[in-house]
Image: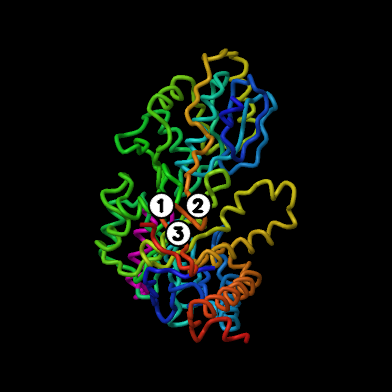
Amino acid sequence: MENEYYPWGGDFTVCKNNGCVAVVLLQINYTPSPDVAIYGPLKTENIGVEKIVANIISNPYIRYLVVCGDDIRGHRSGSSLLALHKYGIDKKNRIINAPGAIPYIENLKKEAIDRFCAQLKIIDMIGIKDKKMIDNAINECIAKTPGCFGEPYIAIRIKPETTKIDDKRALHSRIIINYMDKVKKRE
Amino acid sequence: MFSFTKKQEVLDISGIKIGGQPGEQPTVLFGGAFFKGIPDFKKTEKDIQNMLDLSKKTGNSSIPDFFIKKEEDVEKIIDFIGNTLPKNQPFSVDIIEPTVKIKVLEQLDKKNLLNRTIYNSIHIGITEKERKALKQHTPDMAIIVAFNPKDKSPDGKIEVLENGAHLTDKGLLAIADELGIKKVLVDTAALAPGDNSGAAISAIPVIKEEYGLPTGCAIHNVVEKSTWLNKYFESAKKTVDVSSNVNIVLFGGDFAIFGPIENADLVFPIIAWQDILVSEYTENYFGVKPAESHPRRKFF
């Protein structure tokens, strides 16, 4: 797992590695119990959702995903995450029935999404900010002791591929700077 | 610092010029209003006036960028724009919700404000209804956000401009053209740290050399998402946020969407300073003459 740079970096807190609950926070200032596996905010309906899916399926102990707080206007990232779990993606990689502005899943294979749907049960608490209610929902999930889903699923190799460029004065593979400092398109 | 081989467009909206070779035009600065909570019109009026005063002092043009979240705010904000901004002042409208976008376009048309409008923005999430509304109520200028969720590199950004990266039926530039929007600015889509955030800056010279279009971004968004700053260096966060905009100028960019309008007092002098630095070199080395309104002419 370490070689793959998981979890994929972002704004989240990892708590108990073999915890069965992950918590998605939507515009809510709330710290879940240290018994959850991971928690953090979700902002975008594309890359943000992809990160959640990839990180969760890399840890087979996570079996519940609690989504709480107020969904973000325009992005509707929480509802888009729920739609992904419920309907999957279409041929253009758009999350089916997602209400977000740009709900595209471009970096995950269908198997990864299938795995996400199979591994997780989603607890939809969008619109709920009452901390006691959220605590109770999390505790109910933990009490079910669902056990490990199986092997970790590595959805994305996080380590980036580098572009090799031989020119010494290159800015990018498409452009170079010539001897007069003029930018020009590479031939 | 450098100059481009490709001819660079200088676009004009209601007297404000955007684009050109590095060192030619002053960097245009977009200051955002109404990001959080209920729109505070009194405060925003003062903030806009302050930003316009800073433009007079430095030569860097201002574009107030109005964030419109809810349908019920549309009329109030458009009325505010019509009644408060100086007669020829251009502005931009920044909207995420597709239904709100359409209502805003209708209202801007109704109030005869489209000739001063920069539509922020066209991206791969454009809907059919939005296209129809843009065709019917066409703004003078639009920002095209080159966000490609699959490939966040400069190449991926060019792909969405060129062919839509299979997410739209054609490239975003062709879509804008088809809608009758003749003046476009390219926003290189600054993403969170960990998502190739640097690509938003490195894409600026690539896109300018490829298309010659005015290019910039909201690089401060990367700072906003750098949560380690909040955690370890809270007092330095604003300094980092404001100074992040310098990257745009250094890489040949034409505009900076610098975030909260309240930061204008800090952003304008930093960018004016950076514009002078670039202009001194590009005039000496490439013969690029700074425009009449350039900060270099104001202060030297």
Residue nearest the observer in this picture, A78 or B213: B213
The residue wearing badge 1 is B157
Chain letter, disc 2 residue: B
* Residue B281 appears in the picture as rendered: yes
Q: Residue at x 43, y 74 (%)?
A: B20
**Residue A37 magenta-highlighted:** no
Start-end of magenta stretch: B95-114
Q: Determine the CA span between mark 1 and mark 2.
A: 9 Å
Q: Mark 3, mark 1: which one is toward the viewer?
A: 3
Q: Which residue is mark 3?
A: A176
Q: Is residue A135 above or below residue B175?
A: above
Could you confirm whether marks 3 and 1 are on the same chain?
Answer: no
Q: Give me the disc on residue A124.
A: none
Local SS, label 1: helix
Query: Disc number at residue B199?
Result: 2
Q: Where residue B147 sits in the image (x, y, percent)?
A: 42, 51
Name the residue: 53% across, 70% down.
Answer: B29
Which amino acid type corresponds to the residue marked 2 in the rendered image? Ala
Nearer to us in this view, A28 or B253: B253
